[in-house]
């Protein structure tokens, strides 16, 4: 008895001596801005948690909580900064009140396309600026999925001239709202749950949401027939936020798992939204053949561009970092846009000329 | 002495008892079609190996060998099938001689764009067909990075009519070569190392390669001034190949690491090539301002489209699986192209009208 007890004890000590790192479970929590069922926005965190769990053999667990749980959809940055959550998933431009430079990491009016913006992030100065801007919050930020170019919105009446915008009541948040306001639009903010009724009853004349994939769930196509192409959010990128202290003390292998999985699920979201939008648009058009896809007339686009440049110039005058990033962004965009035109635009134009499109 | 020896022995036994799985190193080899220094094509395997090594704490090692080592750039599928290499990195359409359906997983003339094709892979039937076609080789296949829309090639003379193609000597491989041959082009194949001299001396009149990022390394812009936009390889996807038996006996966590890292590095390659192409184009245009970017005239494009459809119809008549995939592909493309036009095309057209492009 005594001998076998000693044996067991020794084996036990040996196991303890080598096991603390490999056996200790790491449990994190991630708060996301969206309801946890709202695909494709809620897909990246859910997929990230699943991948990290599998890659770590169940030893690194991330519990994802949607807004139905934490009730603070726009409090994600604060909660990750404060450490209540180790991670967050949201959109950077929600914190433009804390620092206007946050807008560069989501999307800006007349800005870069998804391919261009990812090129700026990874092969230009985008990630460098992202790190700088988030540094003061004690938070790391990573791209977290892209919606692609968003639609310009649902309008009850056709917009034929710049004057048609004057006095128009529209739900359009962010920088785009500031641009529209310069052209006389009465920009309003209305909670998501009340938008359909507001548009149906004419409380508002127009609204922008995302694109067919997400818009179809809201039903806007049933109450407004003009669907305008986008100019204001050409590449809305979501954001993963990570508390710096929490990340820095992770074992290196878990840091790499996180970074690799974040990149994989970001690409997934872009493709998921693209596929869902194509499906949803086919469905909308079939069920509501009266919907008209419109591009704003050139004078309206010119006025929007001019107003956008004014908004940029105003922020640049107040904020030197904004000016610095804006100049870097514009120079990079000029270079990549030339390639977008040669590679992407002319291919789709050829397709149009040949009647390959519907 | 005796006691301490016993203690050491017991601890040793305890360690051995729990360590075999965690300590055993897995060593794989990956053969790639390209020289191991040829970025961006060689980037995905190199980055994959690095990520997997880090995520596994150095326990899963993939040794990457370029064509300078194995000397069999077009033998990758055979070597992975035979088990000499557990993995490969190449392009699926190189095996069209073994099965014509391999072409669907790289790109096809007048086919889908990268966003569309990824949507087909992951949210349509693309991955299902890829699995089916590779199954008989005992190999799994995964997307491995995309070049985006390739340029239509460098031409010494301008192509003004369909007749200008007759007798033209051009290096253009794959289905696109079959299409060109139908229009009277004298399609030749010349090793990469001899292409520059052949074009310079007029041994050939034209050639297609990839796009500015890779073309600039070959120097074609120094000896031909017409640079045509693409129609024949709108979304060339690279391919990771994995020997099935080797993959199936991997621990689950390593399988997930591989799959996650393959997706992350594929996205990286698309962006790397996009960024490099933009840089290279800016450089070429500055140093050789005479270069003219051209789109084939509409009658030439129509003739190319008609010839492409004939090539497809001929393969479909001989191969029922080709017919099945072609029909699925066309139906999916029709749906996603409508969304590409609304989201991507009109945005770039707006950009063009506003003079944002250079």
Image (cartoon, coloured by chain):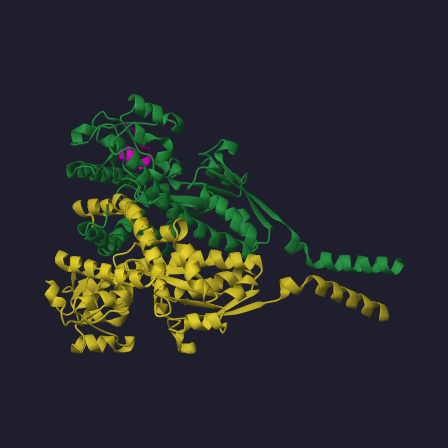
Chain colours: A yellow, B green
Rendered view: A158 above or below B245: below
Main SS category, magenta section: helix
Is residue B238 located in the magenta-colored stretch of the structure?
no
- Residue at 26%, 76% (x, y): give it: A190
Q: Is B207 left or right of B248, judged from the image as shown? A: left
Start-end of magenta stretch: B170-179
Q: Position of residue B44 (x, y in %)?
A: 45, 45
Percent across and percent down for residue B172 are 31, 32
Q: From what the image shows, is residue A49 above or below residue B137? A: below
**B73 to A17, vertically: above or below:** above
Taking the image as shown, residue A298 lies to the left or right of residue B177, namely: left
Answer above or below: position of B27 versus A317: above
A11 and B355: which is toward the camera:
B355
Residue A165 place in picture, x, y as percent: 14, 67
Residue B83 picture quarter: top right
Spot the residue most to the right.
B1
- Number of callouts in the render? 0
Q: Residue at x 40, y 40 (%)?
A: B91
> Where is residue A69 drawn, in percent x and y?
43, 77
């Amino acid at each position: 008895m005594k001998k076998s007890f000693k044996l067991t004890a020794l084996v036990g000590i040996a196991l303890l001596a080598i096991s603390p790192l490999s056996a200790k479970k790491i449990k994190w929590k991630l708060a996301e801005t969206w309801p946890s069922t709202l695909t494709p926005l809620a897909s990246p965190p859910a997929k990230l948690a699943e991948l990290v769990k599998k890659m770590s053999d169940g030893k690194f667990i991330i519990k994802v909580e949607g807004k139905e749980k934490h009730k603070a959809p726009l409090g994600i940055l604060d909660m990750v900064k404060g450490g209540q959550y180790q991670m967050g998933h949201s959109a950077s431009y929600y914190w433009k009140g804390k620092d206007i430079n946050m807008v560069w990491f989501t999307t800006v009016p007349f800005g870069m396309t998804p391919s261009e913006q990812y090129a700026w992030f990874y092969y230009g100065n985008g990630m460098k600026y992202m790190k700088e801007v988030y540094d003061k919050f004690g938070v790391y930020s990573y791209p977290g999925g892209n919606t692609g170019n968003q639609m310009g919105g649902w309008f009850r009446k056709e917009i034929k001239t710049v004057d048609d915008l004057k006095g128009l009541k529209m739900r359009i948040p962010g920088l785009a709202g500031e641009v529209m306001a310069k052209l006389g639009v009465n920009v309003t903010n209305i909670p998501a749950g009340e938008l359909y009724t507001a548009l149906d009853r004419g409380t508002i004349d127009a609204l922008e949401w995302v694109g067919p994939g997400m818009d179809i769930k809201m039903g806007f196509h049933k109450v407004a027939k003009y669907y305008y192409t986008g100019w204001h959010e050409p590449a809305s990128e979501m954001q993963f936020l990570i508390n710096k202290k929490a990340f820095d003390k992770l074992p290196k292998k878990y840091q790499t798992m996180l970074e690799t999985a974040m990149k994989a699920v970001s690409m997934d979201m872009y493709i998921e939204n693209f596929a869902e939008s194509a499906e949803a648009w086919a469905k909308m058009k079939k069920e509501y053949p009266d919907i008209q896809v419109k591009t704003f007339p050139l004078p309206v686009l010119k006025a929007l561009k001019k107003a956008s440049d004014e908004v940029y110039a105003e922020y640049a005058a107040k904020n030197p970092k904004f000016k610095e990033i804006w100049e870097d962004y514009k120079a990079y965009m000029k270079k990549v846009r030339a390639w977008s035109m040669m590679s992407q635009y002319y291919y789709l134009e050829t397709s149009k000329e040949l009647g390959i499109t519907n």
